[in-house]
Structure formats: structure tokens, C-alpha cells
């Protein structure tokens, strides 16, 4: 603190998100008294909190074990969502315009229309991947449960941090996802400690792994201006109640699953138009299918 009470000799800037929320009980009571709807919601929450619950906040299933013959058995029920969440398929679209002259004269030795459609579809799939990671409604970075989000111990991603992340998705985890710079930062931390992660075979390619789980690069995971990023760990597949992709197959003029190309006609300038559409979404079946290691600092380069 400087000489005057309103002047600081230094400033501190937070490089990671933080939330501070305080509310005196008297202020809460005043707000609740002003809204009957809020009062009813608070009462329902209090009633639910008084019921036996498991670690996931669901109604606990009461069981009887170790009992003798003719003992009274416990009655119970399984909790379920009365109004489950509905997912609408998102769409990425564009109109590909090709001059008929190109289609007529330059389709040999390669089909120009097919090649332009291929590049257009690749761009749509890139946008789909970005949306499934970053979309505020269904993107994985925004839909992980708060209890499944952890922070690094010291900033850079260390082997200890990845072990902590494994503890959040401890049932049959399938894959880590991280920005390539995050993977490089993890490699530096392993080198610093003299730890050499193994690699696994995935589709005929050797990829880095941790505890036998592949660590795959995903450049759709953002890196902030403060050089921080996130790492995801997920269990995939409907059978394992994991993270799944949603799509609609069998749509008209389908060329790939949930992606179609529709002819829109030829205008008076000889331009052929094709509407290219991709439909997609993603869902986390249960909270412990997805864990996120947040606020990873990837800009530190210490000596080994």
C-alpha cells in the first residue's frame, strides 16, 4: 500500500476465472418474501435436501443386507427425471456455387464438382467439431458438471493433475482431449520429472498416452489470451453411459451420416447451387462420463 489509502503500490491480475458470491441470510429472506415462486422453489429444494441422497444428488436406493430369515425388507424407488432435457440437432449449412462451365469442361481427370463438395464437407465437419466443443448449449466444455471440473495444482499440466482428472472419470475412461500446446506443456512437465509416458496404438498410429489412455490433440479447445487452456477426459458410448454424438440418419439426399447435399437449381448466369447441411449435437449421459482439468497454464517454460 502506498502513502495514501486509495493508491496501491502494485496491482494483481487474475489469469484464471474465479467466482465469489456472498449473500447475508437477511437479504435472502427479503428476496424470497417478495416472490411466491422463488419461495416455493426454495421450499422444494429444502425438502429434497432432507431426503436421503447418494453422492450424485439422486434419491438413495435403500437396500437390506445381512438380514436374517423373515426380516422386513426395505422399500425403495429409483430416482428419475420427470422432465428430462431435450436436445435439438444443431445445423451447419452453406450454399456451394459451381459454374456449369467448370462442371462441363474441367471434370477430367478429376471431377471438379466432387472435389469442391469434398472441401465444403470438410469445412462443415470442422465447424461441427468446434460447435460440439464450444457451443454454449450442448458443447462439452460448457456441459460438464461442476463437480467434474478441477484445477491444476501448480499451473502447468503435471502427471499428478492427470491422475486427479482420472479420478473424476474413474469408470472405463476412453480418451483425453487437449490442445496440441497443452500436450506439449504436459510433455515438458514429464521431462522435468524424468517421467516418460507410454504410447498406444490407435488406428495403426502410435499416439501418446497416460495410464494407457490415449491423449489426442484437439485444436478446437480454446487457448486464452493468458495462455491457459483445458483438458477433457471422457467415457464414450451409449452402452457405457458415456458421451455420445447425436445425429439423424436417413435424411433426403444424404451423402454422409446426417449430412446431405441438395440440388437447388441453375440460375440465369449458369451458376449451379447446392445446399450442403450437417446436423449434429452431443450429450453427456451421466455426469461422471466427462471431466475437465481447467486453467492449465501452457506458457511456462522452466528449466529442467
Image (cartoon, grey):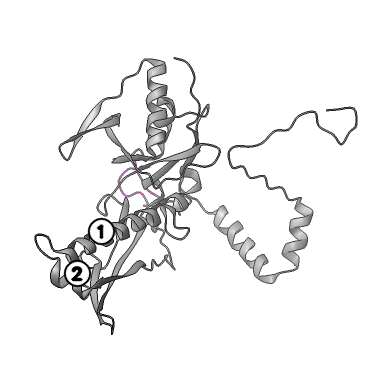
The relative height of residue 112 versus residue 211 in the rendered view (above or below) is below
Q: Residue 211 location, x and y as percent?
A: 30, 29
Q: Which secondary structure is most common in the magenta stretch?
A: loop
- Write down the region rendered in magenta: 63-71
Q: Please state which of the two labelled residues, at mark 2 or mark 1, is closer to the viewer.
A: 2
Give SS at disc 2: helix
Residue under the point 23% across and 64% down? 117
Residue 111 sits in quarter: bottom left
Q: Is residue 274 left or right of residue 218?
A: left
Residue 187 in the figure: left or right of residue 251: right
Q: Position of residue 218 (x, y in %)?
A: 35, 43
Q: What is the C-alpha distance between the residues marked 2 and 1?
A: 16 Å
Q: Residues within 10 Å of mark 1 (few under 14, many from 20)?
A: few
Question: Which of these two is toward me, 56 or 250?
Answer: 250
* Residue lying at 34% horizontally and 58% vertically, measured from the top left: 128
Give the vertical position of 273 relative to 303 (above or below): below
Picture disc at residue 102: 2
Which residue is rendered at x = 25% and y = 79% of the image?
A: 270
Residue 284 located within the stretch drawn in magenta = no
Name the residue that disc number 1 marks: 119
Amino acid at each position: 500500500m502506498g502513502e495514501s489509502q486509495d493508491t496501491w503500490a502494485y496491482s494483481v491480475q487474475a489469469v484464471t476465472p474465479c467466482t465469489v458470491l456472498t449473500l447475508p441470510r437477511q437479504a435472502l429472506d427479503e428476496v424470497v418474501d417478495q416472490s411466491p415462486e422463488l419461495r416455493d422453489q426454495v421450499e422444494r429444494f429444502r425438502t429434497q435436501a432432507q431426503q436421503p441422497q447418494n453422492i450424485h444428488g439422486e434419491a438413495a436406493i435403500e437396500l437390506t443386507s445381512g438380514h436374517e430369515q423373515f426380516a422386513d425388507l426395505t422399500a425403495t424407488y429409483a430416482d428419475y427425471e420427470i422432465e428430462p432435457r431435450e436436445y435439438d440437432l444443431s445445423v451447419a449449412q452453406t450454399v456451394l456455387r459451381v459454374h456449369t462451365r467448370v462442371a462441363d469442361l474441367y471434370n477430367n481427370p478429376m471431377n471438379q464438382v466432387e472435389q469442391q463438395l469434398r472441401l465444403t464437407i470438410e469445412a462443415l465437419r470442422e465447424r461441427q467439431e468446434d460447435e460440439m466443443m464450444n457451443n454454449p448449449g450442448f458443447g462439452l466444455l460448457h456441459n460438464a458438471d461442476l463437480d467434474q471440473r478441477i484445477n491444476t495444482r501448480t499451473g502447468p499440466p503435471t502427471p499428478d493433475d492427470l491422475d486427479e482428472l482420472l479420478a473424476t472419470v474413474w469408470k472405463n475412461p476412453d480418451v483425453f482431449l487437449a490442445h496440441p500446446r497443452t500436450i506439449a506443456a504436459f510433455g515438458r512437465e514429464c521431462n522435468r520429472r524424468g517421467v516418460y509416458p507410454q504410447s498406444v496404438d490407435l488406428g495403426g498410429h502410435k499416439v501418446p498416452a497416460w495410464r494407457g489412455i490415449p491423449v489426442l490433440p484437439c485444436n478446437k479447445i480454446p487457448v486464452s489470451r493468458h495462455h491457459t487452456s483445458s483438458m477433457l477426459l471422457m467415457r464414450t458410448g451409449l452402452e457405457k453411459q458415456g458421451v455420445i454424438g447425436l445425429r439423424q440418419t436417413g435424411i433426403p439426399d444424404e451423402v454422409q451420416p446426417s449430412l446431405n447435399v441438395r440440388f437447388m437449381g441453375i440460375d440465369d448466369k449458369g451458376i449451379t447451387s447446392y445446399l450442403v447441411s450437417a446436423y449434429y449435437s452431443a450429450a453427456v449421459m451421466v455426469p461422471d462420463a466427462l471431466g475437465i482439468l481447467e486453467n492449465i497454464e501452457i506458457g511456462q517454460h522452466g528449466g529442467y
